Amino acid sequence: MTPPFLDIARLSCGYGSQVVLKEISFSVQKGDIVTIIGPNGCGKTTLLKTLPGLIPALGGRVNMQGQDMKKMPRDLRARTIAMVMQTLESIHMTVEEYVLLGRLPHFSSWQFLENEADRDLARSFMAFTHIDHLRRSPLNCISSGERQLAGIAKALVQEPALLLMDEPTSHLDISHQAQILNRVKTMKDRHGLTVVMVQHDLNLASEYSDQVLLLDKNTHTVFNYGTPETVITRDNIRAVYHTDVVVAPNPHSGRPGIFIKTDSQESISP
Amino acid sequence: MNDTGAKRWILIIGSLSVLLTACALTALRLGSTPLSSAQIFDALFHDQDSITASIILGIRLPRVILAIAVGGALSVAGTLLQGLFRNPLVEPYTLGISGGASLGVCIAILMNLPALLGVTAYPLAGFAGAGIVIVLVYGLGLRTGRLQPNTMLLIGVMISFVSSSLVMLLMAVSEQDDLSNIVFWIMGSLDEPSPVLIRLVLAGSIAGLVIALYHSLALNAMVLGDDEAALLGIHTARTRKILFITASLLTGLSVSAGGIIMFVGLIVPHFMRMVAGSDHRILIISSFLGGACFLTFCDIVARMVIAPLELPVGVITGIIGGVVFIYVLGKKKVAL
């Protein structure tokens, strides 16, 4: 078996003395889409930000393609990993200027202006995410869903090997949700892009993921890690989310689908 | 930036350069002895011994150069700080640098340092005062961790209050002559007798412009927030330190040579953001040129309105800048 693309070993995440996740270990194969799920406050975003070192790890290590992330040079990291943040600053900068910033890691050390290839790439990914008509609009004049699309275009323009996404579809309507995740899946299928994302929508997680990482808030560890079929089960959801749901296969894909039961909250919560 | 973008940048830089040349020429022509452009050209390049030449080279040209250097420096400093702090209301004086400089000059005047050090006493004292404040804001900011923008702003504003209170205290106990000296210096003037200092300010502001431009791409990324910038490979902490110190030194240098010239560092960056956009590569260049134009123009007004007497240029920049800005803001509904 090939060594994993991303190897997380005994990683502890948190802020100073506040430990959010304790010594968790898992690995990600190249070209997989891994979705982190779990209840609010269980440390999904914290984990996602600890992977590239935005939040310093409290312990353990993250290896990417055999290299310790901590020792990875800043510029190499920027050429390998891109991240779509949960919310994008609403600033006065045009969509095109913003997307072009994704080319920054690929600039040579004295390069001051983008070249034709950079602009072409930016244009093609703006078309890919359906925001090419907004390229001259400032970020603070478009909707939050459009901003999210711009964030994804910027991340793809960075041409990363690993794409991290923090709730990339939270502000999108159902057509854009499907569109974006289909596009990400296309990038994975065609270019072997590895994706780790945080997702609140369990159905989307189930549909699009190769592996699902379910975090538990009470034990600060991984509750279960595996294919959607093994992780997204009624018992697991009940144990971690304290909510009783119906799990039935999606008639189209056969993957587990989640249906909420009314009043289920009261019957279980202590 | 695409092809039309490149043309736009060239157009912006070109028109600001033409405007700056026009302002500078007007400033050289106007004065107690009005001169023609031909006379100025003659004095600059041919006959450097005539009386005209001594007026141009000895009096008017140094003043124009100082206006360009100080106007450019304050505007670049304002652009850098607004970008770094991601706050459109920050300006070079918010950080208390002007307060420190005024206090320094106040003390110099009261201790009669000019008698000891000659014409360089005020700028030296101003720069020392500014330097102490920079070290204080920076040092206290570092103690709270990694230069937290809001903490630094608060520290700066508090230092401003303390030093302006101390200046008022000193003014209250000073003699009439000293008092008018202090007031005149605080209101800002480009009447700087030391050619060495003028050269120093010019060299400093050009060096500041180059450093700012070198970091302009990083600054573009940092506007997105530290996390996004770090993921784009930017050394955010180091860039913030370098640009903060650059902006502080530009301000300190300007204040020690020209006194407190209000509003340039606040208004010019805003105005240029409307004209040139928010990409710091073009914004920094146009702020430098625009600030130079603005201050040269305001200095002409300050010299001419009640000639042969002279108004403090800091008052003119405040009035013209403020009124024009409110007018433009009212007409053009732009988000800052």
Image: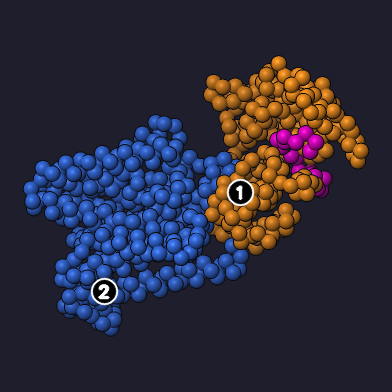
Q: Which residue is mark 2?
A: B28
**Which residue corresponds to the image point at 83% horizontal and 25% vertical from the top-left?**
A233
Range covered by the magenta-colored residues: A183-204
Q: Residue at x 37, y 38 (%)?
A: B154
Write down the residue under mark 1.
Answer: A105
Q: Is residue B311 visible?
A: yes
Instruction: Give residue B321's position: percent from left, percent from top.
Output: 34, 62
Q: Is residue A30 visible?
A: no
Q: Are marks 2 and 1 in contact (CB under 8 Å)?
A: no
Residue, x 58% and y 32% (percent of image)? Answer: A55
Quarter of the image where one finds residue A117? bottom right
Is residue B82 toward the left or the right of residue A131 in the image?
left
Q: Position of residue B61 (x, y in %)?
A: 25, 69
Q: Inspect the image, locate mark 2, and give the three-letter code of the amino acid beneath it.
A: Leu
Are the residues under badges 2 and 1 in a single subunit? no
Report which colour depicts chain B: blue
Q: CA distance from mark 2 to mark 1?
A: 47 Å
Q: Which chain is orange?
A: A
